[in-house]
């Protein structure tokens, strides 16, 4: 880390914006730090909710390891680099679309099927289950169903549409099966706590 780096820069980074959706207008000292970070393939990454972190530049690891590791590692690295191009979530709120999340679930499900004996399999399964749970049930601030209000326990229309999309596109996938079961349980008025147990994402 450059010696000129100060801990308050990440906290103040949001204040460098001069307008909505405008690129940050960085002070000279922060521009210097950004340039130093870039030399070692790091960058400032705004995650939302006024949170900024320092992350590896997407595609960095793929550029290093492509053709130099086993196919499972290369697939894993390329998948992670691709996902790293977008912020996933912040403060219990999803930042990518439901369709993008569904495609991530499929990608890692296919990895598990193709490389069941990979040394990465435990890590991949953990990530897969997290994505699958988020896809089916959502997060605290971006749920797939109404948690409060007039119709608690009702699936949102956009999520139902997304579940139907993934069922049609990947009918034999595990996520398609679970999405079907989930919709049936919600439509039957099954308590949400019971649905979590019956769907059993772990």
Image (cartoon, rainbow, N blue to C red):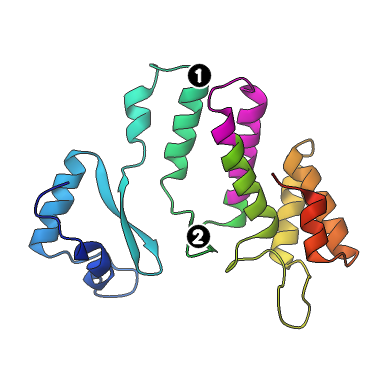
Q: Quick one: 40 or 163, which is closer to the camera? A: 40
Q: Secondary structure at mark 2?
A: loop
The label on residue 44 is none
Q: Which residues are magenta?
A: 101-124
Q: Quadrant of the C terminus?
A: top right
Asked if residue 129 lies left or right of residue 71, the reply is right
Asked whether 82 or 77 is in front, the reply is 77
Residue located 57% across and 50% down the image: 100
| Count of numbered labels shown in the rendering | 2
119 left or right of 198 in image: left
Q: Which residue is mark 2?
A: 95
Dominant secondary structure of the residues highlighted in magenta in the image: helix
Do the CB atoms of the residues marked 2 and 1 lie less than 8 Å apart? no
Measuring from the top left, give residue 101's x and y in whole percent.
59, 50
Residue under label 1: 71
Magenta-span inclusion, residue 111:
yes
Structural crowding at the residue carrying mark 1, measured as other residues with C-alpha within 10 Å and reported as few (<14), some (14–19) or many (≥20): few
Task: Indicate the position of residue 102 as horizontal and vertical percent values.
Answer: 64, 48
Q: Is residue 148 left or right of residue 120?
A: right
Label whose residue precedes the other's in the sequence (2 or 1): 1
The percent position of residue 196, horizontal first and vertical second, equals: 76, 56
For the point 31% across and 42% down, which residue is it?
A: 57
**Residue at the image position 12 percent from the left and 65 percent from the top:** 27
Q: CA distance from mark 2 to mark 1?
A: 30 Å
Above or below: residue 62 compared with residue 147 = above
Q: Is residue 193 above or below residue 175?
A: below
Say which quarter of the image contains residue 81: top left
Instruction: Tell me the element at label 1.
Output: helix
């Amino acid at each position: 880390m450059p010696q000129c780096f100060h801990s308050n820069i990440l906290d103040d980074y949001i204040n460098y914006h001069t307008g909505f959706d405008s690129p940050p207008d960085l002070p000279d000292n922060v521009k210097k730090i950004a340039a130093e970070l870039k030399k070692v393939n790091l960058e400032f990454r705004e995650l939302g909710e006024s949170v900024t972190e320092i992350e590896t530049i997407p595609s960095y690891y793929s550029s290093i390891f492509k053709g130099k590791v086993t196919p499972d590692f290369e697939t894993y690295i390329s998948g992670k680099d691709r996902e790293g191009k977008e912020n996933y979530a912040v403060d219990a709120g999803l930042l990518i679309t439901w369709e993008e999340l569904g495609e991530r679930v499929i990608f890692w499900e296919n990895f598990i099927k193709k490389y069941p004996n990979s040394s990465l399999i435990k890590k991949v399964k953990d990530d897969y289950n997290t994505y699958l749970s988020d896809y089916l049930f959502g997060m605290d601030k971006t749920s797939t169903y109404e948690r409060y209000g007039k119709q608690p326990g009702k699936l949102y229309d956009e999520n139902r549409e997304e579940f139907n999309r993934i069922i049609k596109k990947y009918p034999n996938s595990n996520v398609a099966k679970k999405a079907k079961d989930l919709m049936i349980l919600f439509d039957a008025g099954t308590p949400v706590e019971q649905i979590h147990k019956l769907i059993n994402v772990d």
